Amino acid sequence: MSNILKVIARVVVDDLDAAVSLYQALADGAEVQRFDFGEVSLASVGPFLLLAGNTAAYSNRVATLVVKDLGPVVEAIVAAGGELVDGPAPGPNGDRLIARNPDGAVFEYIQGG
């Protein structure tokens, strides 16, 4: 069974309030969960994570992956010659990690269950 539970598309938007209705419609009326992380306002809408505000430090990430356990992720990234950019550390939705793969792709991983 895969360690990856869910893949979330990251979308940087200018106006979070204006964007939410479209992504909620695309996600069949999924519940909207809003939260802040530093200077960024976020909305989780089904398979989408909308980001607005000072997103410069976060816009390089390909996707957010929810995983059962961060341990195997750390092992795989390090073994492949990748880089742990940030974490593992607590985050607003669970322990998280930012990693850069050897090919340059940057992903956020959140441990969830």
Image (cartoon, grey):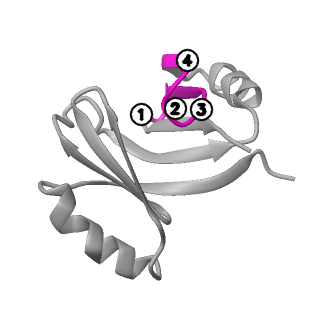
Residue 32 lies left or right of residue 94; in this view the side is: left
In this view, 41 is above or below 14 = above
Callout in the foreground (2, 4)? 4
Mark carried by residue 101:
2
Residue that lies at the very extreme toward the right in this rendered image: 1
Type of amino acid at the residue the image marks with label 3:
Gly
As rendered, which of 113 and 106 lies closer to the eye?
113
Residue, disc 4: 89
Residue, disc 1: 104
Residue 39 lies left or right of residue 101; in this view the side is: left
Residue drawn where x is 47% and y is 82% of the image: 28
Q: Earlier in the sequence, mark 1 or mark 4?
A: 4
Marks 2/4: CA distance?
19 Å
Q: Are marks 2 and 1 in contact (CB under 8 Å)?
A: yes
Occupied quadrant, residue 19: bottom left
Callout in the foreground (3, 4)? 3
Residue drawn where x is 49% and y is 45% of the image: 64
Q: Position of residue 56 (x, y in %)?
A: 19, 33
Mark 2, Cα crowd under 10 Å, few <14 / some 14-19 / many 20+, is: some
Residue, disc 3: 94
User: Which segment is the magenta one?
Assistant: 86-103
Q: Are marks 3 and 1 in contact (CB under 8 Å)?
A: no
